[in-house]
Image: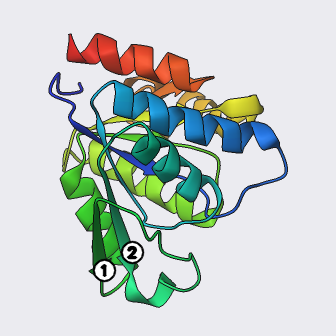
């Protein structure tokens, strides 16, 4: 399903740190690992929380990071000041579309409503064949266990057109995602 030519991944995650320090550590580790693997990052452009940690990790390892932030959130999410490229959009819809257009795959990390919105929009677009980008969930500390169980329940109740595993690859660590990306690229 995923293109073997994965050059840029979208990373969707929180602009907050959350209560479990494992999420921040994994965010930075993921950013670093993607840079070492030669994969660029496009994300929401924030400098705080998990968003900032992914960008900082990637940049510290010599990677290229593109941030896409709507003008209304420049202050709220404290736009990152050291990105390779920053795109300011009119609104959230343009932000998401820009990120989707610039990525070859997506990684979903822990987050709130916005992160779930991005996950479900990408899943819906996959289902409708608007794109066929591979979607990874980084399930650090079991953060998404309940959501994954619910998605499987939706499948069992025959409300989905495809199996959950046809649309999502769930990984427990940044290393596991990097292994999967490497497998897809080779």
User: Which of the two discs, 2 and 1, labels the residue nearer the N terminus?
Assistant: 2
Which label number is shown at residue 69?
2
Considering the image in quadrants, where does the N terminus appear? top left
Can see residue 157? no
Relative to 165, 51 lies left or right: right
> Residue placed farthest to the right in the image?
19
Mark 1 element type:
strand
- At 48% from the left and 29% from the top, the residue drawn is 164
- At 34% from the left and 68% from the top, the residue drawn is 68
The crowd level at tag 1 (other Cα within 10 Å; few <14, some 14-19, many 20+) is some
Give the quadrant of residue 149: top right
Place of residue 57 in the rendered image (x, y in percent of width and height, measured from the top left):
51, 43
- At 43% from the left and 66% from the top, the residue drawn is 45
Disc 2 to disc 1: CB gap under 8 Å = yes
Residue 75 vertical placement versus 60 (above, below): below
User: Which residue position holds label 1?
Assistant: 88
Residue 81 vertical placement versus 19 (above, below): below
Between 43 and 149, the one nearer to me in the picture: 43
Relative to 23, 85 lies left or right: left
Place of residue 79 in the rendered image (x, y in percent of width and height, measured from the top left):
48, 74
CA–CA distance between discs 2 and 1? 5 Å
The crowd level at tag 2 (other Cα within 10 Å; few <14, some 14-19, many 20+) is many
């Amino acid at each position: 399903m995923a293109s073997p030519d994965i050059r840029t991944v979208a990373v969707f995650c929180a602009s907050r740190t959350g209560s479990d320090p494992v999420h921040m550590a994994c965010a930075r580790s993921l950013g670093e690992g993607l840079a070492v693997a030669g994969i660029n990052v496009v994300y929401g452009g924030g400098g705080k929380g998990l968003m900032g940690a992914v960008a900082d990790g990637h940049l510290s390892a010599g990677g290229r990071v593109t941030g896409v932030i709507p003008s209304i959130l420049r202050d709220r999410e404290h736009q990152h000041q050291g990105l390779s490229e920053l795109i300011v959009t009119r609104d959230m819809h343009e932000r998401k579309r820009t990120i989707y257009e610039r990525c070859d795959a997506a990684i979903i990390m822990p987050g709130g409503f916005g992160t779930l919105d991005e996950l479900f929009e990408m899943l819906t677009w996959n289902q409708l064949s608007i794109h066929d980008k591979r979607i990874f969930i980084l399930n650090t500390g079991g953060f998404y266990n309940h959501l994954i169980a619910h998605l499987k329940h939706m499948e069992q109740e025959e409300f989905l057109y495809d199996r959950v595993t046809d649309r999502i690859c769930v990984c427990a660590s940044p290393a596991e995602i990097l292994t999967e990306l490497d497998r897809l690229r080779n």
